[in-house]
Amino acid sequence: MSTHDHAASSRDDVSMRLEERERILEHQLGYLYDEVLQLKKERYEITYTASWLLVRPLLRAEEALVGFVRRLFARGSQPAAPAAGEPARPVRAETRAAPPRRILVDVTGTVLRDMGTGIERMTKDLSQALRDADPETCLLVRCENGGLLKCEAPIGSKRRDLDSPMSIEPGDQLLILADAWNYPQAYDGVFDAVHAGGGRVIVCVPDVIPELYPAACHERTVELYQPWLRDILLSADGVLCISRAARDDLLHVVAERSLPHRPQLPVDWFHIATRFEPRPDVDAREKIRQLFEGRAHVFLCVGTFEPRKGQLIAVRAFEQLWEQGDPARLVFVGRRGWFDYALAARILNHVEYGRRLFWFDDVKDDELSFLYTHMSALVYPSFAEGFGLPIVEASRCGKPVICSDIPVFREVGAEGAIYFPLNDPSALAQAIRHWEAKAVQARPDRVLGATWAEAAARIIETVRNDRWEYRLP
């Protein structure tokens, strides 16, 4: 490629990125506008009822409690200020540690805060895979009082009575996998202790969504995540992401915003996996079994209700299909998250709710397997993800996936998924029509089929042999 062609290609990439960002921002603006209108409506309904006399003092007490907890967490998440006359701690220069020996897999999050989310499941599954790969030198640890404790209890257990203090040895690698930004106080002093013992700290940054799209995240997440990421870029010895696309997003954010970072900070990626297995014969509740009565196609949309997951795009797309007489059913599976009042009201008050539109917020693993196994196809209209695990789960059941055309979905779905333009309900409706008419075909066998053993092997190879794919300038 000539210099002129390369420059033109770079300009095209920048232009496409800007157009995509504009579409996402327009979508978020409309989404949040609907949210404000719904909250305003509900506020009026509360205000002009007698119950408001009881609710108002409770809300004031809640605001005071939230403010107290927020200030408490803010103190714990900020680096300690240097004492009077003491110089600020400089950014640690790059040093060559001793040859890596042990990988200390941090499970602090599963002990302190296991909510069963995707990140926490990833932490437990990957921790187990690392232990299986090398049980002698991949050890489970947790952070406490500025040091490390070796965990003897099984992964996921909250027992602490068997834990014992652990000394850092030269070459040790502390691997932090979980959403550590949610409990930064647990790591106070830990990085310094590891470095003082001749070890290194490797941190998993699953995605940079709170940086790219803060309006799509819970406000508490943004407050915690952004200072955490900036601290990691200066204090960690390596960063791992859960996909190549997530790694590219991180590099883009660092470059675009000129975020301070350690010179030559290593950055790499691995692919997460799932232990999900098809179970078509589980004892699902009657309401779920009834979804599959008749000959209508049943489309599943899995994910917590939050702005970036795209449930609103799915509703609008199926409204177009229903207007044209399509009997297809749309089934949402996911708990309520944040900024979801307007979306929830739209679904629960929809004329098709209970007929062709359904929502289950309490589905367990067995019933989810039943739904995946019996559905016609998965609809995945998210605009921002670190990976996209439902694509892999659906493909394990041999089911087609119709998803947003974003880089990470192209990486995971590969040649096996059907893609539609981002945040475009009409395009999604058209993709569904084409699939129903057999004008397009999905290939579940061509979707990414990563395993936890492969993820563990890549991580071990990267951190032990210092074989990082990229280093920040």
Image: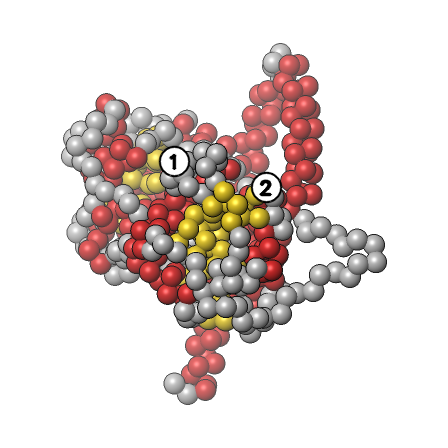
Of the image marks 1 and 2, the number of the one nearer the N terminus? 2
Residue 95 or 344: which is nearer the viewer? 95
The answer to whether residue 326 is visible is no
The residue at the point 22 percent across, 48 percent down is 396
Q: Which of 265 and 384 is in front in this view?
A: 265
Q: Are marks 1 and 2 in contact (CB under 8 Å)?
A: no
Q: Distance between the residues labelled 1 and 2?
A: 21 Å
Check the image and report above or below for 332 versus 447. Answer: above
Question: What mark, if any, has residue 334 been given in the picture?
Answer: 1
* Residue at (17, 32) in percent of width and height: 281
Q: Position of residue 30 (x, y in %)?
A: 52, 44
Residue type at mark 1: give it: Gly
Please tell me which residue is depicted at 35% across the width and 40% down the height of the picture.
302
Q: What element carries label 2?
A: helix
Q: Quadrant of residue 371?
A: top left
User: Percent position (x, y) of residue 456?
Assistant: 35, 57
Furthest-top residue in this view = 50
Q: Which mark is residue 409?
A: none
Asked if 472 appears above or below 403 in the picture, the reply is: below
Give the residue drawn at x 36%, y 42%.
314
Q: Residues within 10 Å of mark 1 (few under 14, many from 20)?
A: some
Q: Relative to 181, does residue 60 appear above or below in the rendering?
A: above
**Residue occupying the far bottom of the picture:** 2
**8 horizontally vs 58: left or right:** left
Tell me the SS state at disc 1: loop
* Percent of width and height locating residue 61: 68, 23
Where is residue 69? Give x, y as percent. 65, 34
Q: Mark 2 points at which residue?
A: 220
Task: Tell me: 251 left or right of 402.
Answer: right
What amino acid does circle 2 point to? Arg
